[in-house]
């Protein structure tokens, strides 16, 4: 029997993933970290190299994460990896995760503009802090923007979730 800690469940539910069984969380919980992991590495490398181009390429991908039912990087799991593993589809992104993608989009634009305008110190400060913020859910399931979403708009409730 798969059991999930209360802390893990609360962190995943804070991102809007409600009503998942312990078995589902055990099966897909790691894969909910996949998109933030790709973003973390991408942002860290782009920041290290002060690559405005690499940061700008990530902007529409992040924005699509705020608009689409899944983040574009979730497609790697949903349409590939899960078929190899025989695991279930990731649930649709809900408002807290979409909010996190919106925050990341604005942060990426600010970081890109800082590097583009020659404000290298600001670019590094924004880029490193964004990479750290993206690394947190990758390593712990705790999403900082989702936490703030909950403070501003209330924690997600089952009736708020799009089950379609």
Image (cartoon, grey):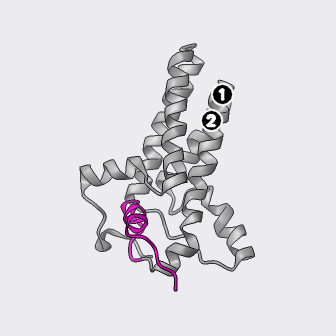
Estimate the x, y position of residue 134 in percent, counting from the top left. 52, 45
Estimate the x, y position of residue 126 in percent, counting from the top left. 49, 28
Residues 55 and 146: in front is 146
Q: Which residue is at 57% across, 43% downward?
A: 60
Question: Hey, which quadrant is residue 10 in on the image?
Answer: bottom left
Q: From the viewer's perspective, is 83 left or right of 33? A: right
Task: Classify 142 as above or below 115.
Answer: below
In the displayed image of the protein, which residue is found farthest to the bottom?
1
Are the two marked residues, 2 and 1, in contact with CB atoms closer than 8 angstroms? yes
Q: Which residue is at 41% across, 60% downward?
A: 15
Q: At numbered mark 1, what does the secondary structure look like: helix, strand or loop?
A: helix
Estimate the x, y position of residue 71 in percent, counting from the top left. 55, 57
Q: Which residue is at 66% across, 65% downward?
A: 77
- Position of the C terminus by quadrant: bottom left
Q: How many marks?
A: 2
Q: Which mark is residue 44?
A: 2
Q: CA distance from mark 2 to mark 1?
A: 6 Å
Q: Which mark is residue 127?
A: none
Q: Which residue is mark 1?
A: 48
What segment is highlighted magenta in the picture?
Answer: 1-19
Task: State yes or no: residue 15 in magenta.
Answer: yes
Q: Which residue is at 75% across, 74% downward?
A: 84
Task: State yes or no: residue 40 in magenta.
Answer: no
Estimate the x, y position of residue 32 in percent, counting from the top left. 54, 62
């Amino acid at each position: 029997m798969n059991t999930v800690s209360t802390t893990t469940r609360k962190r995943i539910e804070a991102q809007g993933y409600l009503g998942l069984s312990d078995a589902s969380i055990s099966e897909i919980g790691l894969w909910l970290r996949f998109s933030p992991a790709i973003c973390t590495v991408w942002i860290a490398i782009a920041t290290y190299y002060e690559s405005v181009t690499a940061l700008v390429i990530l902007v529409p991908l992040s924005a699509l994460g705020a608009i689409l039912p899944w983040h574009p990087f979730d497609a790697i799991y949903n349409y590939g990896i899960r078929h190899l593993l025989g695991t279930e589809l990731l649930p649709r992104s809900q408002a807290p995760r979409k909010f996190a993608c919106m925050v990341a989009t604005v942060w990426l634009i600010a970081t890109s503009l800082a590097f583009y305008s020659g404000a290298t110190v600001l670019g590094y400060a924004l880029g490193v802090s964004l990479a750290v913020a993206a690394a947190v859910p990758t390593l712990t399931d705790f999403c900082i923007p989702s936490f703030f979403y909950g403070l501003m708009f209330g924690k997600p409730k089952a009736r708020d979730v799009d089950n379609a």
